[in-house]
Image (tube, rainbow, N blue to C red):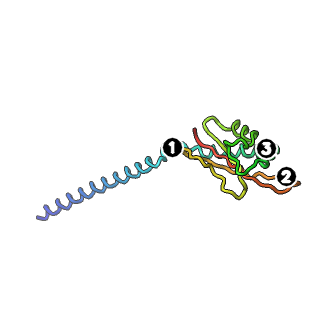
């Protein structure tokens, strides 16, 4: 009788270990499916690269007196990329410096306005603003130039 009980106990321990192993496998598979489903594996993250490109373009515009003047003189505010009154010099600089794998557009707004991209784009949109102002000798005037880029 004692031998029978000992065998039954060992048998229960074996089943418990099998169930524990099965649950462990299910947990690992569940985590893997979650990570793959969220796109963490195999997804190319270009955000740092795009932000560096945007900042470089905006610095060039911001340091060019002619382009700054063009932005400050653009009227009426806000000035959209597609409109005819968007400064050509600024538009050409953005187009010239944009890599082939990106599309970019910009918008000129008043410094206190929400300056966003109005049309919907598929995928991630990367935005960077810069404040453009006059030189110290002139009457204070400020504009915000927002640059928007997205993958083609």
Measured from the top left, where is residue 30 in percent x and y?
Answer: 38, 52
Q: Residues within 10 Å of mark 1 (few under 14, many from 20)?
A: few
Left or right: where 120 falls relative to 138: left
Nearest to the observer: residue 69 or residue 83: 83
Distance Cα–Cα, label 3 vs label 2: 13 Å
Q: Earlier in the sequence, mark 1 or mark 2?
A: 1
Numbered disc 3: secondary structure? helix
What residue sits 40% from the left and 48% below the top? 33
Q: Residues within 10 Å of mark 3 (few under 14, many from 20)?
A: many
Q: Which mark is residue 98?
A: none
Q: Position of residue 19 (x, y in %)?
A: 27, 56
Q: Mark 1 and mark 3 in contact (Cβ < 8 Å)?
A: no
The image position of residue 17, as x and y in percent, is: 28, 56
- Mark 2 sits on what residue? 135
Q: Is residue 37 shown left or right of residue 92?
A: left
Measured Cα–Cα span from mark 3 to mark 1: 37 Å
SS of the residue under disc 2:
loop
Q: Are marks 3 and 2 in contact (CB under 8 Å)?
A: no
Kindly identify which residue carries mark 3. 67
Label 2 crowd bin: few (<14), some (14–19), many (20+), radius 10 Å:
few
> Where, quadrant-wise, is the C terminus in this rendering?
top right
Q: Residue at x 79, y 45 (%)?
A: 70
Residue hosting label 1: 43
| Foreground label between 1 and 2 | 2
Residue 64 found in image quarter = top right
Mark 3 or mark 2: whose residue is earlier in sequence: 3
Residue displayed at 63% across by 44% down: 149
Q: Is residue 118 above or below residue 92?
A: below
Q: Residue furthest bottom?
A: 2
Q: Quadrant of residue 111?
A: bottom right
């Amino acid at each position: 009788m004692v031998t029978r009980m000992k065998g039954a106990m060992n048998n229960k321990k074996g089943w418990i270990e099998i169930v524990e192993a099965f649950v462990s496998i299910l947990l690992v598979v569940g985590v893997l499916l979650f990570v793959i489903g969220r796109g963490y594996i195999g997804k190319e993250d270009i955000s740092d690269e795009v932000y560096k490109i945007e900042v470089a373009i905006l610095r060039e515009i911001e340091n060019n007196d002619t382009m700054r003047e063009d932005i400050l003189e653009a009227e009426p505010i806000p000035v959209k990329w597609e409109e005819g009154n968007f400064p050509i010099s600024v538009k050409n600089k953005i187009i010239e410096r944009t890599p082939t794998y990106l599309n970019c557009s910009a918008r000129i707004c008043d410094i206190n306005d929400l300056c966003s991209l109005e049309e919907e784009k598929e995928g991630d949109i990367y935005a960077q603003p810069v404040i453009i102002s006059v030189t110290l000798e002139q009457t204070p005037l400020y504009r915000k130039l927002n640059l928007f880029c997205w993958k083609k």
